[in-house]
Amino acid sequence: MKDAFVTIAVNDLRGTREGIVLDWGGTNRPLLPGSQVPGYTTGATTPLGSDKPIGAPVDFSIPLDFNGSDGIFFAPFGVQNQVTLKSNWPDPAFRGAFLPAERSVRADGFEAKWRVSYYGRDYPQQWTGRGGNERFNTKSVYDSRFGAQFLSILDAYRYFERSIKYGVLFLVLVFTTFFLFEVTAQQKIHPFQYLMVGAALCLFYLLLLSISEFIGFGGAYLVAALASAGLITWYCRFFLGGGVRTLMIGAGLAGVYLFLYITLRQQDYALLMGSIALFVVLAVVMYVTRKVDWYARDAS
């Protein structure tokens, strides 16, 4: 057994801040860089350096310290693989070929347990030769991985990215309202006025991004929403004639901006709330235009 060694394959060891040491039956053995696993070069290896055969089970452990990783994944090399992950990260995403048998996700962290048999992979348990078995390759190992990815916590830039996805809702709501004014109230609105209002709606996102770099997302959203809604309401007062129509535009913008802010704060129900909002807008438009004689309007 003098040529026996212990090797591990880790795809990224750049975040390791301390030396890797193998505890082999109570004896510490430092690991050297480089993996002997076929197809993998990144990792660590240490020779056992003993002429005595291994005649009984040996308990061993390899503590690993990582920094800056966006996730951790395991390959089921054993016959029965049991993995337990505990972390204070609040937003995990469980990925890979196997989902946890047990999991608990809380605001202060998560805990997950996997129980994976070797029947769920494509490569054998053992083979002869250091070159490896033809079925043991990087693709087969990658396909058998399981673990957790640490999703980025929502910050100002993530909120801004998510808010852009709802930009169509703003444009559709405002422009549809203007169009309904033209159809139902014979209110003439010039394409240039549509363009100016659209520019003001787009400016909201630029204000939101720039101000959030100084005062945080919540305050930036309030300032940008008030500025954008105020500018559009003031501008509409001149070509909508003031009164109820202008108030409808201002109130509608205030409601949509408030709805968007609440939706952005919902991590689990954001898509559902956005879908419901679009459905409601479509239903309102269909209800208002249900009796419009479109052919008469085209003829005129």
Image (cartoon, rainbow, N blue to C red):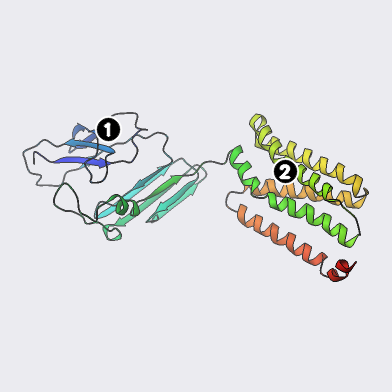
Residue flagged by tag 2: what amino acid is it?
A: Cys
Residue highlighted by disc 2: 202
Label 1 element class: loop
Q: How many marks?
A: 2
- Reading the chain from its start, which is encountered first: label 2 or label 1? 1
**Left or right of 87 in this view: 276:** right
| Callout 2 crowding tier (Cα within 10 Å): few <14, some 14–19, many ≥20 | some
Pick whichever, 58 or 189, lies toward us. Answer: 189
The percent coordinates of residue 87 (x first, y second) are: 43, 41
**Left or right of 22 in this view: 169:** right
Q: Is residue 250 visible?
A: no
Residue at image point 18% right, 53% down: 126
Residue at image point 87% right, 52% down: 189
Say if mark 2 contacts mark 1, CB within 8 Å: no
Pick whichever, 4 or 198, lies toward us. Answer: 198
**Left or right of 106 in this view: 244:** right
Residue highlighted by disc 1: 20
Residue at image point 77% right, 49% down: 255
The percent coordinates of residue 5 (x first, y second) are: 16, 40
Q: Is residue 112 above or below residue 216?
A: below
The residue mark sitting in front, 2 or 1, is 2
Q: CA distance from mark 2 to mark 1?
A: 53 Å
**Left or right of 202 in this view: 114:** left
Residue flagged by tag 1: what amino acid is it?
A: Ile
Residue at image point 50% right, 45% down: 91
Pick whichever, 194 or 259, lies toward us. Answer: 194
The percent coordinates of residue 271 (x first, y second) are: 61, 55
Q: Quadrant of the C terminus?
A: bottom right
Q: Is residue 143 above or below residue 53?
A: below
The percent coordinates of residue 201 (x first, y second) are: 75, 44
Label 2 element class: helix
Q: Is residue 39 visible?
A: yes
